[in-house]
């Protein structure tokens, strides 16, 4: 997926306001300072404030403190590169491209809780895939929320792709079934399924998601090939629970981190990486369909630390 | 909900209260745990620090360590400070003000995906139920299909929600544009909506606005202009209860451009630890007015700081429960039923009616969480509302005669009912047996004093109602006075065991 090459610049632009808004970044805090207990305390605070989570923060801070006591770390700048190394190492080289089906339609199931930006993220994915020359079909499986199908349709019109839809209030698995048949019949490359936002605590809705997955799998061999969990970059530690529960119900294969263009630093993916191994595949950084990037650990960590 | 905060807090405090004598070191240690659990709950770092500092100062200042019941006193201090943090006990009256001449104008604002449109509908339903007519106006011209969504929601409120008042919708779908374009048009739409609302004599006008980033100057300017032109009586900031540390930044930014006078927390029915609520209140000073607790349009509750603090500390929230019950059952109905019960004439039909009322009040687990002590005991119990479905199915498979006098149900009737409801024979006989036990009890209870009633309900225990719904043995803990002291027996035994260790 050659087009999904992240440019550090674009991600940085997305996060530029972070630093203005919060009066300085970790980099600003550490650069040119002598390391002492007070600075370590400040560091802890900044990490927590980035939603990195108590557990990951403690781990990172303990290492710094230990090295400080042993005299290995004495300067803020050293801490900065130490942190950068530690954080980047959390995402070793891995294949973060979309899993494509070599012999037929690739089915991408997009899911997440209410209001994280599923539909907008789908528009972005759709645009990127089309730019690469893939034909795309959309399936509107959010039959619950008022206006959801229409929202997807408007995006589809703007992007010039077709949507398979069903009845408002109908069975989303039935729409998924129809969408799969249509995708096979038309011979499209990729089918993206939009689903209704659901809280991971609502058992019946999570079971419905399981059902959609099963139905799709029966229609097309190996489908869904990719299950993307959309997470809101502003969300706190609860996103961890979301990752766990959605994985249980639908076997999440990748995370789409949306809304990274606010002042939130998206540190939540660090917290998630600390306990579950789901690759972050994309980041969304704006409102237009062009605003999507592949996740690159270096770029992300640079942006997290600020410059 | 705040369950996770509750766990951490009550764990730390329980350990304190188990000790006859506590030292300053004990208190500090407990506060460290409180601090961690608040941070894990996404309460903002600074808010946590100052909270813990205040509690610690209080505790040491009041010489908690020398008190006779140091644990209890400590819980008292934390409760007091929590109430303060969540909004103070003496807040401005809850609900939506009413101005004359109308309409009262309510404006929503917030980030994308926080739940503004859904909340507009819920607020509409809330007002309709209270006999106030509303108009929902779609001023979100940015998100595709937002206008259609609000229109559908308005229709649902109008057709499906209880209450007699009119529900109107105002929207100009042809004015929608792509994101970032048509900025400012929303202000004109809002003005025309206001004019229309005046014409119709609507009580309250609710303005839905586009979700926007707090750092988007153009769109924030639009909101500011809207406030200047329309002079809303309420401006509510809608906040996702799952927001992390950044909640503070966005809330501050909205508050800087607008006079936000209330916060509505959404998605509160998830297992979020809900710390954002605490932070937002602290930085804006605007009280939390409502909480969204479900997908349904009726799932909006008024927020009460003292009750929420009680819930966080596992002290239960009986007041909210009683209020909920009052909303659903008229006094007349309640009196009639009581008379029937006193005569021992309660039939399965009455029972079914009560069951349905109970279910209308919300998911069982949510209700049980409001009972003192039950919340903690229930945290791992998986209550399936399905169990109640089965009871309903069984009763519905009975003939009117059988419902009135369940004693006539013999083996053959039992088999028919079981087959009709897809249950087993023994399920039916169990239901009948328990029903008879309840009936006998209610009859004798009618002749008892208050103290006897409590005792009798307690004795009913697992054999009665509790047994009917597997996994709901917490029911006997339904006591008249709520405090952490009156935890269910099982839990108290557990605590005692812990202390010995």
Image (tube, coloured by chain):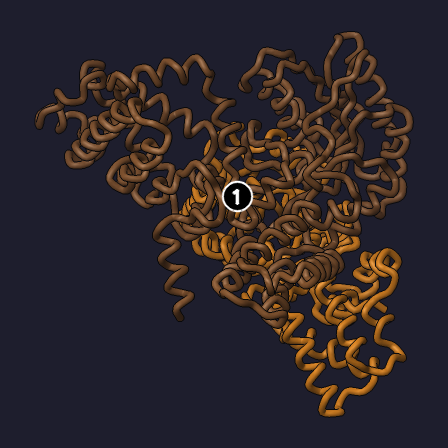
Chain colours: A orange, B brown
**Percent position of residue B70, x then y:** 56, 60
Residue beneath disc 1: A183
Residue B421 seen in this snapshot: no
Q: Residue at x 80, y 11 (%)?
A: B198
Q: Front-most of A228 and B78? A: B78
Q: Front-most of B93 and A302? A: B93
**Percent position of residue A266, x then y:** 71, 59
Quarter of the picture containing the C terminus of chain B is bottom left
**Percent position of residue B440, x then y:** 22, 26
Residue B180 seen in this snapshot: yes
Tell me: residue B350, above or below residue A268.
Answer: above
Q: Front-most of B46 and B427? A: B46
Left or right, residue A99 beside residue A295: left
**Percent position of residue A279, x then y:** 59, 64
Q: Residue at x 83, y 80 (%)?
A: A76
Q: Chain of mark 1?
A: A
Left or right, residue B235 beside residue B393: right
Q: Residue at x 64, y 12 (%)?
A: B166
Tell me: residue B267, above or below residue B123.
Answer: below
């Amino acid at each position: 997926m050659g087009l999904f090459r992240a440019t550090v610049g674009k991600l940085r632009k997305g996060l530029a306001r972070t630093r203005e808004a919060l009066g300085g970044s970790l980099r600003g805090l550490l650069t040119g300072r002598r390391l002492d207990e007070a600075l370590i305390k400040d560091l802890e605070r900044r990490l927590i404030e980035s939603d990195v989570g108590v557990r990951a923060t403690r781990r990172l801070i303990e290492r710094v403190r230990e090295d400080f006591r042993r005299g290995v770390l004495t300067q803020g700048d050293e801490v900065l590169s130490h942190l950068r190394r530690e954080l980047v190492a959390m995402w070793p080289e891995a294949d973060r491209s979309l899993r494509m089906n070599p012999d037929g339609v690739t089915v991408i199931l997009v899911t997440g809780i209410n209001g994280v930006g599923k539909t907008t993220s789908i528009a972005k994915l759709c645009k990127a895939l089309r730019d690469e020359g893939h034909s795309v079909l959309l399936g509107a499986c959010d039959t619950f929320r008022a206006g959801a199908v229409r929202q997807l349709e408007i995006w589809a019109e703007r992007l010039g792709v077709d949507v398979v839809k069903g009845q408002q209030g109908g069975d989303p698995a039935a729409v998924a079934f129809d969408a799969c048949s249509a995708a096979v019949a038309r011979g499209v490359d990729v089918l993206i399924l939009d689903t209704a936002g659901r809280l991971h605590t609502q058992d019946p809705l999570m079971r419905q998601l399981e059902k959609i997955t099963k139905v799709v799998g029966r229609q097309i061999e190996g489908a869904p090939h990719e299950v993307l969990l959309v997470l809101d970059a502003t969300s706190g530690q609860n996103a961890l629970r979301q990752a766990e529960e959605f994985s249980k119900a639908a076997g999440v294969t990748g995370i789409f981190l949306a809304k990274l263009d606010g002042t939130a630093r998206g540190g939540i993916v660090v917290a998630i990486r600390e306990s579950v191994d789901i690759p972050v595949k994309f980041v969304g950084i704006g409102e237009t369909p062009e605003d999507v990037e592949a996740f690159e650990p270096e770029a992300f960590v640079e942006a997290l630390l600020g410059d | 909900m705040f369950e996770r905060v509750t766990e951490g807090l009550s764990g730390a405090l329980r350990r304190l209260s188990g000790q006859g004598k506590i030292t300053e070191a004990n208190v500090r240690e407990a506060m460290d745990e409180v601090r961690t659990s608040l941070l894990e709950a996404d309460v903002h770092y600074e808010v946590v620090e100052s909270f813990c500092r205040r509690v610690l100062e209080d505790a040491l200042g009041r010489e908690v360590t020398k008190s006779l019941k140091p644990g209890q006193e400590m819980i008292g201090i934390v409760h007091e400070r929590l109430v303060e943090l969540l909004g103070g006990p003496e807040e401005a009256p809850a609900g939506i003000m009413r101005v004359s001449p109308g309409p009262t104008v309510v404006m929503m604002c917030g980030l994308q995906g926080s739940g503004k449109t859904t909340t507009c509908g819920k607020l509409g339903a809330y007002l309709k139920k209270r006999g106030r007519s509303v108009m929902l106006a779609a001023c979100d011209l940015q998100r595709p299909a937002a206008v259609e969504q609000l229109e559908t929601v308005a229709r649902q409120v109008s057709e499906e929600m209880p209450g007699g008042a009119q529900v109107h919708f105002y929207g100009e779908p042809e004015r929608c544009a792509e994101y970032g374009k048509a900025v400012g048009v929303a202000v004109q739409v809002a003005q025309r909506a206001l004019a229309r609302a005046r014409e119709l004599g609507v009580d309250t006008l609710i303005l839905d606005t586009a979700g926007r980033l707090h750092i988007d100057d153009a769109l924030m300017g639009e909101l500011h202009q809207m406030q200047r032109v329309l002079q809303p009586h309420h401006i509510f900031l809608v906040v996702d209860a799952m927001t992390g540390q950044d909640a503070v930044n966005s809330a501050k930014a909205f508050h800087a451009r607008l006079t936000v006078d209330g916060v509505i927390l959404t998605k509160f029915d998830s297992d979020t630890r809900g710390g954002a609520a605490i932070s937002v209140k602290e930085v804006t000073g605007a009280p939390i007015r409502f909480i969204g607790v479900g997908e349904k349009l009726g799932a909006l509750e008024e927020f009460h700081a003292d009750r929420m603090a009680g819930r966080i500390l596992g002290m239960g929230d009986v007041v909210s429960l009683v209020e909920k019950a009052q909303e659903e059952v008229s006094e007349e109905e309640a009196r009639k039923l009581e008379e029937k019960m006193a005569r021992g004439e309660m039939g399965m039909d009455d029972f079914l009616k009560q069951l349905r009322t109970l279910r209308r009040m919300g998911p069982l687990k949510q209700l049980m969480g409001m009972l003192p002590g039950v919340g903690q005991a229930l945290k791992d119990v998986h209550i399936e509302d399905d169990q109640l479905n089965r009871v309903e199915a069984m009763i519905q498979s009975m003939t009117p005669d059988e419902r009135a006098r369940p004693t006539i149900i013999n083996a053959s009737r039992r088999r028919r009912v079981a087959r009709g409801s897809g249950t087993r024979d023994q399920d039916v006989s169990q239901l009948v047996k328990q029903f008879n036990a309840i009936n006998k009890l209610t009859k004798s209870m009618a002749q008892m004093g208050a103290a006897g009633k409590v005792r009798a309900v307690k004795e009913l225990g697992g054999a009665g109602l509790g047994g009917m719904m597997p996994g709901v043995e917490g029911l006997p803990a339904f006591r008249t006075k709520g405090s952490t002291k009156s935890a269910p027996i099982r839990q108290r035994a557990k605590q005692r065991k812990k202390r010995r260790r």
